[in-house]
Image (cartoon, coloured by chain):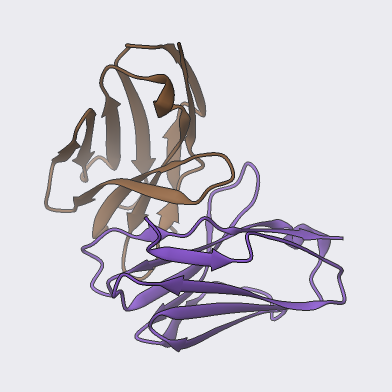
Amino acid sequence: KQEVTQIPAALSVPEGENLVLNCSFTDSAIYNLQWFRQDPGKGLTSLLLIQSSQREQTSGRLNASLDKSSGRSTLYIAASQPGDSATYLCAVRPGNQFYFGTGTSLTVIP
Amino acid sequence: ETGVTQTPRHLVMGMTNKKSLKCEQHLGHNAMYWYKQSAKKPLELMFVYSLEERVENNSVPSRFSPECPNSSHLFLHLHTLQPEDSALYLCASSTRQGRQPQHFGDGTRLSIL
């Protein structure tokens, strides 16, 4: 069974700092990997989707990479802002199933 | 974005009650999902509907009964729930082919007394 791990579980950084969130998965047979953001009491907002044939995707200050063979993905956030404070989750899709990590709780201190 | 709408946002019910959660999507997707999110645990996929047919049922107790009358609507019927069923229940939708992202609703916060 696919297992998804996110490290660290929590992260606190000063505003303006660049940071990296990590996601690892045990089975490389995936269609794609998706990064989400979740604010307290809210659903998940899709940030980036990387297909299995791709190496990275970028959206504004966010850059996600995928190394399928090693079972790893990173989410890079440049010039962090207090509004980036949220829980970040990654999910992999092998078929109809989606497997999620437990997330990284990010706090950006003004 | 109001692509996926869930109602109610909050629900408190006793263990003997019967209630239903509703999900509606306006994105033209043909696959819909129910997830359970409990504190400190990964999202658990409960059910997947593709073209209105249930294609995944991850050993969910029978006290949870999904219904997908059409590709835009998804229900989760609840009865005789247990305290450990208290959680955030999230609905999502996507294209069946899976090359597009999943879109989530804001969830229903369910509390069982």
Between residue A70 and residue A33, name the one nearer to us: A33
Residue at the image position 43 percent from the left and 46 percent from the top: A4
Residue B52, position in %: x, y? 40, 87
Q: Residue at x 38, y 83 (%)?
A: B71
Q: Residue at x 64, y 51 (%)?
A: B38
In the figure, the shade used to draw chain B is purple
Task: Please provide percent x and percent y for residue B100.
Answer: 23, 62
Whole-percent x, y for residue A84 in the image: 40, 27
Q: Residue at x 73, y 77 (%)?
A: B19
Tell me where residue A93 sits by quadrant. bottom left
Between residue A64 and residue A80, name the one nearer to us. A80
Query: Is B54 placed above or below A16 here?
Result: below
- Quarter of the image with the C terminus of chain A is top left
B45 versus B24 height, above or below: above
Image chain in brown: A
Res. A28 visible in picture: no
Relative to A22, residue B6 above or below: below
Residue A21 on image: x %, y % = 36, 28
